[in-house]
Amino acid sequence: MSKKKVVVLSGAGISAESGLKTFRDSDGLWEGYNIEDVATPRAWRKDPQLVLDFYNYRRKNVLDAQPNAAHFGFAELEKDFEVTIITQNIDDLHERAGSTKVLHLHGEIFKMRSERDIGLVYEIKGDIKIGDRAEDGGQLRPHIVWFEEPVPMIEEAIPIVRQADIFVVVGTSLVVYPAAGLVDYARWDTPKYIIDKRIPYTPELNITAIEKPATEGIKELMSLLGLR
Ligand SMILES: NC(=O)c1ccc[n+]([C@@H]2O[C@H](COP(=O)([O-])OP(=O)(O)OC[C@H]3O[C@@H](n4cnc5c(N)ncnc54)[C@H](O)[C@@H]3O)[C@@H](O)[C@H]2O)c1
């Protein structure tokens, strides 16, 4: 018998206990920065050095961070289910915990791309500097979807959510669109769960709330799924 499909929509909250700060838990500042100053196309045009400094620092943080029990728990679900993680996170903690199908809606901190051609993407573990160029001559920038930019991966994510047999939302404030809108694509009769230390508003009524930190919530989810 084929395994049931579990689809997980994760956000910054799942990585909070790994020491990576969420955005909205700190008064609309992300690590002390206004989002408009570091994560928009306008910021890139105005002060690319500041934007590079910000993401070069983020990259170091992520290198130093380790996956936590929630990342490991979702990876472990693969023993019993066919699991796809759709994450808004730019870190690679799901992958390092062992999840094999991870779709990054908002890009990846360990990738960079040409500022001209979205298709010219490269791996990066160190810093990106002004003057580093892609093969088309374009300045290299973080492979991150900034606010006000289109989210091409959403087209891939929607059919995955439609096919979910079980849908789980974890550690996201559900305010950044189009990611937050994915909840609406799950079938009405699909069992849905939301794990968050403070459950955010969702218009979805047929959803089981697990109001706990992600590392605790994953244990409750597993028991609700009959695994422990
Ligand atoms: N680690 C990362 O990659 C990272 C970190 C910060 C922001 N971002 C980006 O910022 C945007 C913000 O959207 P978002 O919804 O992902 O994050 P968000 O900061 O808007 O919301 C975080 C959510 O996580 C919850 N939370 C905090 N600590 C938790 C814990 N220990 N356990 C469970 N839940 C916890 C909060 O209550 C909140 O609902 C996204 O686009 C994302 O790409 C990414």
Image (cartoon, rainbow, N blue to C red):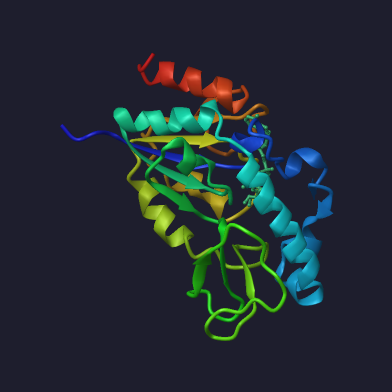
Q: Nearer the viewer, residue 127 or 223?
A: 127
Q: Which residue sits furthest bottom? A: 137
Instruction: Look at the image and tell me whether residue 174 can be seen.
Output: no
Instruction: Look at the image and tell me whether residue 163 can be seen.
Output: yes
Residue drawn 58% across the image and 27% down it: 214
Residue drawn 55% across the image and 22% down it: 217
Q: Nearer the viewer, residue 72 or 134?
A: 134
Locate the C terminus by quadrant: top left
Image check: 57 left or right of 33?
A: left
Locate the N terminus by quadrant: top left
Q: Which residue sits furthest left? A: 1
Image check: 30 left or right of 181?
A: right
Image check: 190 left or right of 46?
A: left
Q: Position of residue 141 (x, y in %)?
A: 64, 70
Q: Quadrant of ligand 1?
A: top right
Up the image or down, 170 lies above or below 56; here it is above
Q: Position of residue 211 (x, y in %)?
A: 61, 23
Residue drawn 53% across the image and 41% down it: 93
